[in-house]
Image: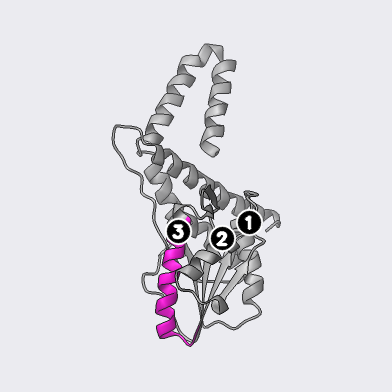
Amino acid sequence: MILFDSFVLLFICFMLCRKRRRLVATAGVALFWLIATGWLAAPLLAWTEAGVTPVERPDMRGHTTLIIIGTGTRRTDAGLQPPRDGQARIRKTAELYRTCRQQAIRCTVVMSGGDPQHHGDTEAAVYGRRLIAEGVDPGDLILEPNSRTTYENAKFTASILRSQHDDARILITSSYQMRRALLDFRRFGIDPQPVYANRRRAQTGWLPRWHNLADANQALHELIGIAQFHVYRRLGWF
């Protein structure tokens, strides 16, 4: 976790900088409080969405492809399941698929996600089963089981899309990931309509809340990924 690593660095500074321990400790406590109470988590989340205009009612015509990105899996007594954000993406994709069947000639769903957590099954397989349970026809579902990052989601999905003609393409993911996902997909010549499956919102106040820390950590992960994309592009690595 990025936040955990940051606080570890602060602790190391606290141990090494004997003359400034009070300053380091004060800075650490202040940073933790600002994040946990939402005052810093909220702008971080907003920053991840900057520049993205989500589409409420995407255009669906001819051959329409819906692209859904995985966000990991979690172990449960019932086996591997999508986490909360993953469930939201599945529900939104199933909802759009039902609408698409009424408006377009053909509707395809591409589910992209490998097994970066080494849980023994891919996100594509786990989410794919849920998509079918939500009403997606197995014949309309394409699984992309090799990607481990958002960049690879775009790269491997683009390879699939190049083999078919699409009149409309729609990307479904959480709001905090959309900005980075669009950068990656456009890098491979795919410019989909962005649809938010869900949005995270920090809860500001005086009391620390765990979900604010989790949201801030996710936001930092995305912002670092965006910065990495631009650096790698300049270096010619992406």
| Helix, strand or loop under label 2 | helix
Q: Can residue 59 be seen from the camera position used here?
A: no
Dominant secondary-structure state across the stretch colored magenta: helix
Q: Where, quadrant-wise, is the N terminus in this rendering?
A: top right
Residue at x 63%, y 71% (from the top left corner): 158
Pointer 3: residues within 10 angstroms few (<14), some, or many (20+)?
Answer: some
Residue at mark 1 to residue at mark 2: CA–CA distance: 7 Å
Mark 2 and mark 3 lie on one chain; the one further toward the N terminus is: 3
Residue 202 percent coordinates (x, y): 36, 44
Residue 25: mark: none
Q: Which residue is mark 2?
A: 126
- Element on which disc 1 rests: loop
Q: Which residues are magenta?
A: 86-106
Asked if residue 126 is positioned above or below residue 43 in the image, the reply reads below
Q: Position of residue 100 (x, y in %)?
A: 43, 80
Circle 3 sits on which residue? Answer: 87
Give the SS element for disc 3.
helix
Question: Magenta stretch containing residue 132, yes or no?
Answer: no
